[in-house]
Image (cartoon, grey):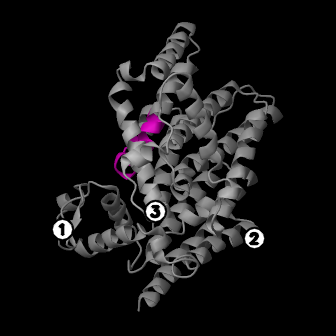
Protein backbone atom coordinates (compact mmCIF):
# COMPACT_ATOMS: atom_id res chain seq x y z
CA UNK A 1 0.00 0.00 0.00
CA UNK A 2 2.88 2.37 0.81
CA UNK A 3 4.25 1.77 -2.67
CA UNK A 4 0.93 2.88 -4.20
CA UNK A 5 1.05 6.10 -2.16
CA UNK A 6 4.57 6.74 -3.46
CA UNK A 7 3.35 6.19 -7.02
CA UNK A 8 0.67 8.85 -6.50
CA UNK A 9 3.28 11.28 -5.13
CA UNK A 10 5.60 10.47 -8.01
CA UNK A 11 3.07 10.83 -10.82
CA UNK A 12 1.06 13.82 -9.65
CA UNK A 13 3.78 15.94 -8.03
CA UNK A 14 7.31 14.91 -8.94
CA UNK A 15 6.85 13.91 -12.59
CA UNK A 16 4.58 16.90 -13.26
CA UNK A 17 7.16 19.23 -11.68
CA UNK A 18 9.98 17.57 -13.62
CA UNK A 19 8.17 17.95 -16.97
CA UNK A 20 7.08 21.53 -16.18
CA UNK A 21 10.61 22.61 -15.24
CA UNK A 22 12.17 20.91 -18.27
CA UNK A 23 9.71 22.69 -20.58
CA UNK A 24 9.90 26.03 -18.75
CA UNK A 25 13.71 26.13 -18.87
CA UNK A 26 13.84 24.57 -22.36
CA UNK A 27 16.55 22.23 -21.19
CA UNK A 28 18.83 20.30 -23.48
CA UNK A 29 18.22 16.52 -23.60
CA UNK A 30 21.26 15.70 -21.45
CA UNK A 31 20.12 18.01 -18.63
CA UNK A 32 16.64 16.51 -18.80
CA UNK A 33 18.17 13.04 -18.45
CA UNK A 34 20.22 14.18 -15.45
CA UNK A 35 17.13 15.63 -13.75
CA UNK A 36 15.36 12.33 -14.38
CA UNK A 37 18.35 10.48 -12.92
CA UNK A 38 17.83 12.32 -9.63
CA UNK A 39 14.29 10.92 -9.48
CA UNK A 40 15.45 7.37 -10.22
CA UNK A 41 18.14 7.53 -7.53
CA UNK A 42 15.45 8.19 -4.89
CA UNK A 43 14.27 4.60 -5.38
CA UNK A 44 17.78 3.10 -5.57
CA UNK A 45 19.06 4.14 -2.15
CA UNK A 46 16.93 3.16 0.88
CA UNK A 47 16.18 -0.58 1.01
CA UNK A 48 18.11 -1.20 -2.23
CA UNK A 49 21.72 0.01 -2.02
CA UNK A 50 21.64 0.13 1.79
CA UNK A 51 19.26 -0.27 4.68
CA UNK A 52 17.65 2.91 6.09
CA UNK A 53 19.64 2.40 9.28
CA UNK A 54 22.81 3.40 7.39
CA UNK A 55 21.46 6.96 7.61
CA UNK A 56 19.55 6.24 10.79
CA UNK A 57 18.34 9.79 11.49
CA UNK A 58 15.99 9.48 8.49
CA UNK A 59 13.57 7.77 10.87
CA UNK A 60 13.32 10.88 13.04
CA UNK A 61 12.47 13.19 10.13
CA UNK A 62 9.92 10.75 8.71
CA UNK A 63 8.19 10.22 12.06
CA UNK A 64 8.15 13.95 12.83
CA UNK A 65 6.69 14.81 9.42
CA UNK A 66 4.01 12.11 9.63
CA UNK A 67 2.95 13.13 13.13
CA UNK A 68 2.77 16.81 12.20
CA UNK A 69 0.89 16.14 8.95
CA UNK A 70 -1.61 13.89 10.76
CA UNK A 71 -2.07 16.49 13.49
CA UNK A 72 -2.94 19.48 11.30
CA UNK A 73 -6.64 18.96 11.94
CA UNK A 74 -6.22 18.94 15.71
CA UNK A 75 -3.52 21.59 16.26
CA UNK A 76 -4.30 25.28 16.47
CA UNK A 77 -2.45 27.74 14.22
CA UNK A 78 -0.49 28.99 17.25
CA UNK A 79 0.63 25.46 18.08
CA UNK A 80 1.65 24.70 14.49
CA UNK A 81 3.74 27.89 14.23
CA UNK A 82 5.18 27.65 17.73
CA UNK A 83 8.55 26.40 16.44
CA UNK A 84 9.34 24.49 19.60
CA UNK A 85 8.45 20.94 18.69
CA UNK A 86 9.24 18.00 20.92
CA UNK A 87 7.80 14.60 20.07
CA UNK A 88 7.10 12.35 23.03
CA UNK A 89 4.94 9.23 22.86
CA UNK A 90 3.79 10.33 19.39
CA UNK A 91 2.46 13.61 20.77
CA UNK A 92 3.57 17.11 19.78
CA UNK A 93 4.51 19.69 22.39
CA UNK A 94 6.41 22.14 20.15
CA UNK A 95 9.03 22.76 17.40
CA UNK A 96 12.30 23.82 19.02
CA UNK A 97 14.75 21.31 17.48
CA UNK A 98 16.08 20.51 14.03
CA UNK A 99 13.92 17.41 13.64
CA UNK A 100 10.74 19.25 14.61
CA UNK A 101 11.30 22.29 12.41
CA UNK A 102 12.36 20.11 9.46
CA UNK A 103 9.28 17.97 9.96
CA UNK A 104 7.08 21.07 10.03
CA UNK A 105 8.52 22.36 6.74
CA UNK A 106 8.27 18.94 5.10
CA UNK A 107 4.69 18.56 6.31
CA UNK A 108 3.68 21.90 4.77
CA UNK A 109 4.90 20.91 1.29
CA UNK A 110 2.14 19.79 -1.13
CA UNK A 111 3.04 16.11 -1.25
CA UNK A 112 -0.24 14.17 -0.86
CA UNK A 113 1.08 11.28 1.24
CA UNK A 114 3.89 11.02 3.80
CA UNK A 115 4.24 7.28 4.32
CA UNK A 116 7.83 6.37 3.49
CA UNK A 117 11.37 7.64 3.24
CA UNK A 118 10.77 8.11 -0.47
CA UNK A 119 8.00 10.60 0.37
CA UNK A 120 10.50 12.90 2.06
CA UNK A 121 13.05 12.24 -0.69
CA UNK A 122 10.53 13.53 -3.21
CA UNK A 123 10.08 16.69 -1.14
CA UNK A 124 13.85 17.17 -1.20
CA UNK A 125 13.75 16.66 -4.96
CA UNK A 126 11.23 19.51 -5.23
CA UNK A 127 13.60 21.75 -3.22
CA UNK A 128 16.43 20.68 -5.53
CA UNK A 129 14.31 21.43 -8.61
CA UNK A 130 13.21 24.87 -7.40
CA UNK A 131 16.79 25.83 -6.57
CA UNK A 132 17.87 24.77 -10.05
CA UNK A 133 15.13 26.95 -11.60
CA UNK A 134 16.24 29.95 -9.54
CA UNK A 135 19.89 29.50 -10.55
CA UNK A 136 18.97 29.14 -14.23
CA UNK A 137 16.51 32.01 -14.49
CA UNK A 138 17.65 34.51 -11.87
CA UNK A 139 21.42 34.01 -11.91
CA UNK A 140 21.75 33.30 -15.65
CA UNK A 141 23.87 30.23 -15.05
CA UNK A 142 26.00 28.73 -17.80
CA UNK A 143 26.76 25.07 -18.55
CA UNK A 144 29.57 24.88 -15.98
CA UNK A 145 27.15 25.79 -13.18
CA UNK A 146 24.32 23.63 -14.52
CA UNK A 147 26.37 20.49 -14.92
CA UNK A 148 28.10 20.91 -11.58
CA UNK A 149 24.69 21.25 -9.93
CA UNK A 150 23.29 18.22 -11.73
CA UNK A 151 26.34 15.97 -11.35
CA UNK A 152 27.82 16.78 -7.93
CA UNK A 153 27.73 13.39 -6.12
CA UNK A 154 27.02 14.73 -2.62
CA UNK A 155 24.06 16.78 -3.85
CA UNK A 156 22.72 13.73 -5.70
CA UNK A 157 23.02 11.69 -2.50
CA UNK A 158 21.61 14.11 0.07
CA UNK A 159 18.78 15.37 -2.14
CA UNK A 160 17.73 11.72 -2.53
CA UNK A 161 17.58 10.95 1.20
CA UNK A 162 15.00 11.72 3.89
CA UNK A 163 17.31 14.17 5.65
CA UNK A 164 17.41 17.92 6.29
CA UNK A 165 20.62 18.54 4.30
CA UNK A 166 18.82 19.81 1.17
CA UNK A 167 16.72 22.17 3.27
CA UNK A 168 19.87 23.49 4.98
CA UNK A 169 21.51 23.95 1.58
CA UNK A 170 18.57 25.96 0.23
CA UNK A 171 18.50 28.29 3.25
CA UNK A 172 22.27 28.77 3.19
CA UNK A 173 22.19 29.38 -0.56
CA UNK A 174 19.73 32.26 -0.28
CA UNK A 175 21.48 33.65 2.77
CA UNK A 176 24.80 33.76 0.89
CA UNK A 177 23.04 34.96 -2.28
CA UNK A 178 21.86 38.12 -0.53
CA UNK A 179 25.21 38.62 1.22
CA UNK A 180 27.40 38.08 -1.87
CA UNK A 181 25.38 38.83 -4.99
CA UNK A 182 22.87 41.39 -3.72
CA UNK A 183 25.24 42.82 -1.10
CA UNK A 184 22.39 42.97 1.42
CA UNK A 185 24.18 41.46 4.40
CA UNK A 186 21.51 42.12 7.02
CA UNK A 187 18.78 40.58 4.86
CA UNK A 188 21.02 37.63 4.11
CA UNK A 189 21.61 37.00 7.82
CA UNK A 190 17.88 37.33 8.53
CA UNK A 191 17.07 34.75 5.84
CA UNK A 192 19.56 32.44 7.53
CA UNK A 193 17.71 32.55 10.89
CA UNK A 194 16.12 29.06 10.47
CA UNK A 195 19.68 27.68 10.58
CA UNK A 196 19.79 28.63 14.27
CA UNK A 197 17.49 25.65 14.79
CA UNK A 198 18.38 23.45 11.83
CA UNK A 199 22.18 23.79 12.07
CA UNK A 200 23.16 26.62 14.39
CA UNK A 201 26.92 26.28 13.81
CA UNK A 202 26.46 26.90 10.09
CA UNK A 203 24.70 30.18 10.83
CA UNK A 204 27.51 31.36 13.12
CA UNK A 205 30.11 30.42 10.51
CA UNK A 206 28.29 32.56 7.94
CA UNK A 207 27.98 35.37 10.52
CA UNK A 208 31.69 35.16 11.37
CA UNK A 209 32.58 35.18 7.67
CA UNK A 210 30.45 38.30 7.15
CA UNK A 211 32.19 40.03 10.04
CA UNK A 212 35.65 39.19 8.69
CA UNK A 213 34.52 40.23 5.21
CA UNK A 214 33.30 43.64 6.36
CA UNK A 215 36.63 44.28 8.10
CA UNK A 216 38.88 43.14 5.26
CA UNK A 217 36.78 44.73 2.52
CA UNK A 218 37.33 48.25 3.86
CA UNK A 219 41.06 48.22 3.09
CA UNK A 220 41.67 50.54 6.03
CA UNK A 221 45.24 50.04 7.28
CA UNK A 222 44.42 50.89 10.89
CA UNK A 223 41.42 48.52 10.95
CA UNK A 224 43.35 45.76 9.19
CA UNK A 225 46.29 46.05 11.60
CA UNK A 226 43.88 45.92 14.55
CA UNK A 227 42.22 42.88 12.99
CA UNK A 228 45.55 41.08 12.56
CA UNK A 229 46.51 41.89 16.15
CA UNK A 230 43.17 40.53 17.37
CA UNK A 231 43.74 37.30 15.42
CA UNK A 232 47.24 36.95 16.90
CA UNK A 233 45.84 37.61 20.37
CA UNK A 234 43.25 34.93 19.77
CA UNK A 235 45.90 32.42 18.67
CA UNK A 236 48.46 33.02 21.41
CA UNK A 237 46.17 33.92 24.33
CA UNK A 238 42.74 32.47 23.42
CA UNK A 239 41.55 32.26 27.03
CA UNK A 240 41.97 36.03 27.46
CA UNK A 241 40.03 37.11 24.37
CA UNK A 242 36.55 38.36 25.45
CA UNK A 243 34.58 36.55 22.73
CA UNK A 244 36.71 33.42 22.35
CA UNK A 245 37.78 32.90 25.96
CA UNK A 246 34.49 31.60 27.45
CA UNK A 247 34.11 29.06 24.63
CA UNK A 248 37.72 27.93 24.20
CA UNK A 249 37.58 25.18 26.84
CA UNK A 250 34.17 24.09 25.55
CA UNK A 251 35.62 23.50 22.08
CA UNK A 252 38.12 21.04 23.57
CA UNK A 253 35.28 19.32 25.45
CA UNK A 254 33.24 19.03 22.26
CA UNK A 255 36.22 17.59 20.39
CA UNK A 256 36.74 14.92 23.03
CA UNK A 257 33.04 14.02 23.10
CA UNK A 258 32.84 13.71 19.32
CA UNK A 259 36.01 11.61 19.18
CA UNK A 260 34.70 9.26 21.86
CA UNK A 261 31.39 8.98 19.98
CA UNK A 262 33.21 8.23 16.73
CA UNK A 263 35.34 5.51 18.33
CA UNK A 264 32.20 3.81 19.61
CA UNK A 265 30.80 3.78 16.05
CA UNK A 266 34.05 2.48 14.56
CA UNK A 267 35.05 -0.12 17.16
CA UNK A 268 31.83 -0.79 19.03
CA UNK A 269 33.69 -0.18 22.29
CA UNK A 270 33.13 2.59 24.81
CA UNK A 271 35.97 5.12 25.17
CA UNK A 272 35.97 7.44 28.16
CA UNK A 273 37.35 10.97 27.85
CA UNK A 274 40.68 10.07 29.38
CA UNK A 275 41.19 7.48 26.64
CA UNK A 276 40.05 10.00 24.05
CA UNK A 277 42.58 12.56 25.33
CA UNK A 278 45.42 10.20 24.51
CA UNK A 279 44.20 9.95 20.91
CA UNK A 280 43.78 13.64 20.11
CA UNK A 281 46.10 16.62 19.76
CA UNK A 282 45.11 19.35 22.23
CA UNK A 283 44.19 22.74 20.77
CA UNK A 284 47.02 24.50 22.55
CA UNK A 285 47.88 28.05 21.53
CA UNK A 286 50.36 30.01 19.43
CA UNK A 287 52.31 28.16 16.74
CA UNK A 288 50.93 24.76 17.79
CA UNK A 289 47.36 26.03 17.32
CA UNK A 290 48.21 27.50 13.90
CA UNK A 291 49.77 24.19 12.87
CA UNK A 292 46.78 22.20 14.15
CA UNK A 293 44.27 24.43 12.32
CA UNK A 294 46.25 24.29 9.07
CA UNK A 295 46.71 20.52 9.26
CA UNK A 296 43.07 19.82 10.06
CA UNK A 297 41.88 22.29 7.42
CA UNK A 298 43.73 20.31 4.74
CA UNK A 299 42.67 16.95 6.19
CA UNK A 300 39.02 18.06 6.35
CA UNK A 301 39.15 18.94 2.65
CA UNK A 302 40.48 15.49 1.73
CA UNK A 303 38.86 13.34 4.43
CA UNK A 304 38.77 10.43 3.79
CA UNK A 305 42.04 9.83 1.94
CA UNK A 306 41.87 7.00 -0.64
CA UNK A 307 43.79 4.60 1.63
CA UNK A 308 41.34 5.27 4.48
CA UNK A 309 38.27 4.17 2.50
CA UNK A 310 36.38 1.13 3.75
CA UNK A 311 33.32 1.04 1.45
CA UNK A 312 31.98 2.31 -1.88
CA UNK A 313 30.52 5.49 -0.37
CA UNK A 314 33.87 6.49 1.08
CA UNK A 315 35.63 5.80 -2.24
CA UNK A 316 33.17 8.11 -4.03
CA UNK A 317 33.61 10.72 -1.31
CA UNK A 318 37.40 10.52 -1.57
CA UNK A 319 37.36 10.96 -5.36
CA UNK A 320 34.89 13.84 -4.96
CA UNK A 321 37.17 15.52 -2.41
CA UNK A 322 40.18 15.31 -4.71
CA UNK A 323 38.12 16.87 -7.51
CA UNK A 324 36.96 19.66 -5.18
CA UNK A 325 40.52 20.52 -4.11
CA UNK A 326 41.61 20.63 -7.76
CA UNK A 327 38.72 23.01 -8.54
CA UNK A 328 39.57 25.26 -5.57
CA UNK A 329 43.18 25.52 -6.74
CA UNK A 330 42.13 26.16 -10.35
CA UNK A 331 39.59 28.81 -9.32
CA UNK A 332 42.02 30.75 -7.16
CA UNK A 333 44.73 30.66 -9.83
CA UNK A 334 42.53 32.49 -12.34
CA UNK A 335 43.09 36.19 -12.91
CA UNK A 336 40.01 38.21 -12.00
CA UNK A 337 39.41 41.53 -13.78
CA UNK A 338 36.47 43.01 -11.88
CA UNK A 339 37.18 44.53 -8.46
CA UNK A 340 33.60 43.75 -7.37
CA UNK A 341 33.99 40.11 -8.32
CA UNK A 342 37.29 39.97 -6.39
CA UNK A 343 35.54 41.25 -3.28
CA UNK A 344 32.78 38.65 -3.57
CA UNK A 345 35.36 35.90 -4.03
CA UNK A 346 37.05 37.16 -0.85
CA UNK A 347 33.87 36.36 1.07
CA UNK A 348 33.64 32.87 -0.45
CA UNK A 349 37.23 32.10 0.53
CA UNK A 350 36.67 33.41 4.05
CA UNK A 351 33.56 31.27 4.44
CA UNK A 352 35.38 28.21 3.12
CA UNK A 353 38.32 28.75 5.47
CA UNK A 354 36.15 29.38 8.55
CA UNK A 355 33.82 26.42 7.96
CA UNK A 356 36.44 23.84 7.01
CA UNK A 357 38.82 24.97 9.79
CA UNK A 358 36.17 24.75 12.52
CA UNK A 359 34.78 21.42 11.35
CA UNK A 360 38.31 20.13 10.82
CA UNK A 361 38.98 20.64 14.54
CA UNK A 362 35.85 18.98 15.89
CA UNK A 363 34.75 16.30 13.36
CA UNK A 364 36.43 12.89 13.26
CA UNK A 365 33.93 10.59 11.54
CA UNK A 366 34.38 10.37 7.74
CA UNK A 367 30.66 10.34 6.95
CA UNK A 368 29.98 13.24 9.30
CA UNK A 369 32.86 15.21 7.76
CA UNK A 370 31.45 14.88 4.24
CA UNK A 371 27.93 15.66 5.43
CA UNK A 372 28.90 18.75 7.42
CA UNK A 373 31.08 20.34 4.76
CA UNK A 374 28.69 19.49 1.89
CA UNK A 375 26.58 22.70 1.92
CA UNK A 376 29.65 24.95 2.28
CA UNK A 377 31.49 23.22 -0.57
CA UNK A 378 28.36 23.23 -2.73
CA UNK A 379 27.73 26.94 -2.21
CA UNK A 380 31.40 27.83 -2.60
CA UNK A 381 31.75 26.17 -6.00
CA UNK A 382 28.34 27.26 -7.28
CA UNK A 383 28.92 30.93 -6.52
CA UNK A 384 32.56 30.82 -7.61
CA UNK A 385 31.52 29.42 -11.00
CA UNK A 386 28.84 32.11 -11.30
CA UNK A 387 31.31 34.86 -10.42
CA UNK A 388 33.84 33.53 -12.93
CA UNK A 389 31.17 33.63 -15.64
CA UNK A 390 30.28 37.22 -14.68
CA UNK A 391 33.95 38.22 -14.77
CA UNK A 392 34.32 36.60 -18.18
CA UNK A 393 31.36 38.62 -19.42
CA UNK A 394 33.01 41.77 -18.12
CA UNK A 395 36.22 40.93 -19.98
CA UNK A 396 34.40 40.18 -23.23
CA UNK A 397 32.52 43.48 -23.10
CA UNK A 398 35.53 45.48 -21.85
CA UNK A 399 33.56 46.65 -18.85
CA UNK A 400 34.88 47.49 -15.41
CA UNK A 401 31.64 46.89 -13.59
CA UNK A 402 28.53 44.87 -14.14
CA UNK A 403 25.12 44.83 -12.53
CA UNK A 404 24.99 41.34 -11.10
CA UNK A 405 21.68 39.46 -10.85
| The N terminus sits in image quarter | bottom left
**3 or 2: tag closer to the N-terminus:** 2
**246 up-or-down from 119: above or below:** above
Question: Which residue bears the numbered disc 3?
Answer: 265
> Left of 209 or right of it: where is 152?
right
Please tell me whether mark 3 or mark 2 is closer to you in this view: 3
> Left of 41 or right of it: where is 62?
left
Q: At x 59% / y 14%, what residue is drawn?
A: 219
Q: SS class of the residue under badge 2? A: helix
Q: At x 47% / y 35%, what residue is drawn?
A: 282
Q: 154 or 357, which is in the foreground?
A: 357
Please tell me whether mark 2 or mark 1 is closer to you in this view: 1
Q: SS class of the residue under badge 3? A: helix
Q: Residues within 10 Å of mark 1 (few under 14, many from 20)?
A: few
What predominant SS class does the magenta segment belong to?
Answer: helix
Q: 150 or 154, which is in the foreground?
A: 154
> Left of 151 or right of it: where is 268?
left
Q: Which residues are magenta?
A: 190-207
Distance (Cα) linking label 3 and label 2: 44 Å
| The C terminus sits in image quarter | top right
Q: Residues within 10 Å of mark 3 (few under 14, many from 20)?
A: few
Q: 204 or 35, which is in the foreground?
A: 204
**261 up-or-down from 399: above or below:** below
Question: Which residue bears the numbered disc 1?
Answer: 75
| Residue 119 drawn in magenta | no
Question: Which residue bears the numbered disc 2?
Answer: 29
Q: Where residue 4 sits: x, y (%)? A: 45, 90
Q: At x 78% / y 34%, what residue is drawn?
A: 334
**2 or 1: tag closer to the N-terminus:** 2
Amino acid sequence: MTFLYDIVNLEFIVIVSFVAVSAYLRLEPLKVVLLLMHIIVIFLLNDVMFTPSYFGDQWGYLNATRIIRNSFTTLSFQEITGFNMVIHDNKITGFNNEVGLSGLIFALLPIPFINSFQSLCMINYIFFLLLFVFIKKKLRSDNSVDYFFLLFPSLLLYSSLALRETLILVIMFFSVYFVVIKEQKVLGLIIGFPLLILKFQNYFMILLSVMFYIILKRRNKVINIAFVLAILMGMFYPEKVPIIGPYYSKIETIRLALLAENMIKVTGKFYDWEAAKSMIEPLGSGISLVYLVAKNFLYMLFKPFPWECRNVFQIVQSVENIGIVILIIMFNSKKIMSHRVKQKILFLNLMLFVSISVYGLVVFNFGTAVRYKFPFIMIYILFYLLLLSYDKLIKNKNLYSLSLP
